[in-house]
């Protein structure tokens, strides 16, 4: 056995460095939770008074909203026990008045419908999907509610007589017919098309519909326009039973007189300081155990403040680079992104690509165009030639070509591919089809308008 010394260079990640990387990739909500946990765990760490006041104000506002939602004038929404709601969801909106179920329940109680039809109607109201439709058959729902078919039919008629019009439908045709029967019962042509001709309507086959209905093509077009003006999702305007998630942008792009600036959105984020009381106590403390405890807490507090400052500085540097490279987007909007990779930003900022990846993870930027995730601004160049087209600009070009086409002779995916190549955007026919589907643009037959 031979023993020898060998010198190697190895990279070892310290616990502090690992935690710094974790702080860097935290979203704004995760970072806020991390800071609040640190404030509770470390007495040496303090937040400025204005943040504490804002947090107290938010708590007071939530209490006031809760009291208002439970006011006696809204008792009708809260007097239903769980046994009256067989499909009571696990997560519900704070106020049933804002939900489709609460809206229907209030109307049912106003009707004072006889039992057991009212029970069936409440069960059906609970069974509606977010669009206001019934996904299951009355037979299946009747077995689940232990009610006979004739009672379920009566409950369905009750539900379909309520607002919003079209609620309780079992398919698109029934939803549209319910709205036509309620709002314009004399429009028999539109009613017949909604009942028997939706497939031809979707394909713009006005001539075929005119022959089927024995009507003039112009009248058929007008009836189809009235059908398209209806709401196919009557329940979509109500609050979801799931708690909504809100996005807090980490960065704001502000337009100045002749340029744009990016600033951190730290309005609701606390500014951390070291406690003067505990710092003086550490200097004057004769007890070694207390001194060791405070020294450890002071070191951890400084590390938290340093990690957050480093995160903000890295994020702001990356955002400034994005703003500089994607200025056409901020001036002109979607469709004007330029190719940009993580390596481009990393080289300009002077960090590794993985650092940029962590910095932009789950981070959002707000500008005059809306709120965008930072990863939205990164895209590769399409093709080897051309003027640097990206997926964003390719979709904008595709949309323009479809809008400008002759709807009597719509362009196929291959023709669209050739026209896009002629304008400097080289992508394959399969990519055209993929982008078309992402933009919810129908295929050639779906866009064709027949005489």
Image (cartoon, rainbow, N blue to C red):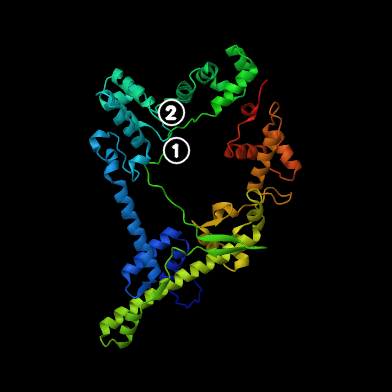
Q: Which mark is residue 165?
A: 2
Q: Quadrant of residue 95?
A: top left
**Residue 173: image location, x then y, percent:** 48, 23
> SS at mark 2?
loop
Q: CA distance from mark 1 to mark 2?
A: 12 Å
Mark earlier in primary sequence (1, 2): 2
Along the horizontal axis of the image, is 68 left or right of 426?
left
What residue would you read off at disc 1? 237
Q: Quadrant of the C terminus?
A: top right
Compared with residue 247, is residue 275 higher up or lower down, i.e. above or below?
below
Q: In which quarter of the view is residue 418 placed?
A: top right
Q: Residue at 42% of width from left, 58% of height from top?
A: 29
Q: Quadrant of the N terminus?
A: bottom left
Measuring from the top left, give residue 416's x and y in whole percent.
70, 36
Q: Can residue 13 be seen in this snapshot?
A: no
What count of labels does the image hold? 2
Q: Nearer the viewer, residue 436 or 22?
A: 436
Up the image or down, 305 lies above or below 365; here it is below
Query: Is 233 drawn above or below residue 190 in the view shown?
Result: below
Is 76 placed above or below 119 here? below
């Amino acid at each position: 056995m031979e023993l020898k010394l060998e010198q190697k260079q190895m990279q070892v990640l310290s616990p502090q460095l690992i935690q710094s990387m974790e702080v860097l990739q935290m979203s704004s909500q995760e970072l806020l939770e991390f800071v609040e946990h640190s404030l509770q765990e470390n007495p040496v760490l303090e937040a400025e008074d204005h943040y504490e006041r804002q947090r107290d104000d938010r708590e007071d506002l939530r209490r006031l909203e809760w009291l208002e939602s439970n006011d006696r004038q809204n008792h009708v929404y809260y007097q239903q026990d769980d046994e009256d709601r067989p499909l009571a969801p696990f997560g519900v909106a704070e106020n049933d008045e804002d939900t489709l179920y609460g809206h229907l329940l209030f109307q049912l109680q106003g009707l004072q419908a006889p039992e057991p039809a009212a029970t069936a109607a409440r069960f059906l109201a609970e069974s509606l999907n977010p669009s206001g439709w019934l996904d299951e058959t009355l037979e299946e729902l009747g077995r689940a509610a232990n009610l006979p078919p004739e009672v379920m039919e009566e409950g369905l008629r009750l539900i379909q007589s309520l607002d919003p019009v079209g609620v309780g439908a079992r398919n698109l045709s029934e939803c549209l017919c319910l709205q036509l029967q309620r709002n314009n019962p004399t429009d028999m042509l539109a009613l017949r098309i909604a009942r028997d001709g939706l497939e031809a309507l979707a394909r713009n086959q006005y001539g075929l519909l005119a022959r089927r209905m024995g009507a003039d093509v112009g009248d058929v077009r007008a009836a189809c326009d009235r059908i398209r003006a209806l709401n196919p999702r009557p329940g979509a305007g109500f609050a979801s039973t799931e708690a909504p998630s809100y996005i807090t942008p980490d960065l704001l792009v502000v337009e100045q007189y002749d340029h744009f600036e990016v600033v951190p959105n730290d309005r609701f984020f606390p500014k951390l300081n070291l406690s003067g009381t505990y710092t003086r106590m550490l200097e004057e403390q004769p007890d070694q155990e207390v001194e060791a405890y405070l020294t450890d807490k002071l070191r951890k507090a400084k590390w938290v403040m340093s990690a957050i400052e480093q995160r903000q500085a890295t994020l702001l540097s990356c955002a400034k680079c994005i703003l500089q490279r994607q200025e056409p987007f901020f001036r002109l909007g979607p469709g004007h992104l330029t190719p940009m990779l993580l390596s481009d930003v990393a080289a300009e900022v002077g960090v590794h690509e993985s650092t940029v990846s962590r910095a932009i993870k789950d981070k959002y930027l707000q500008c005059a165009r809306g709120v965008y995730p930072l990863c939205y601004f990164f895209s590769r160049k399409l093709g080897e030639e051309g003027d640097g087209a990206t997926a964003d600009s390719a979709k904008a070009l595709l949309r323009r070509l479809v809008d400008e086409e002759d709807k009597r002779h719509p362009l196929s995916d291959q023709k669209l591919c050739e026209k896009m190549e002629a304008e400097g955007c080289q992508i394959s026919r399969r990519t055209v089809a993929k982008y078309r589907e992402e933009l919810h643009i129908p295929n050639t037959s779906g866009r064709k308008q027949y005489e």
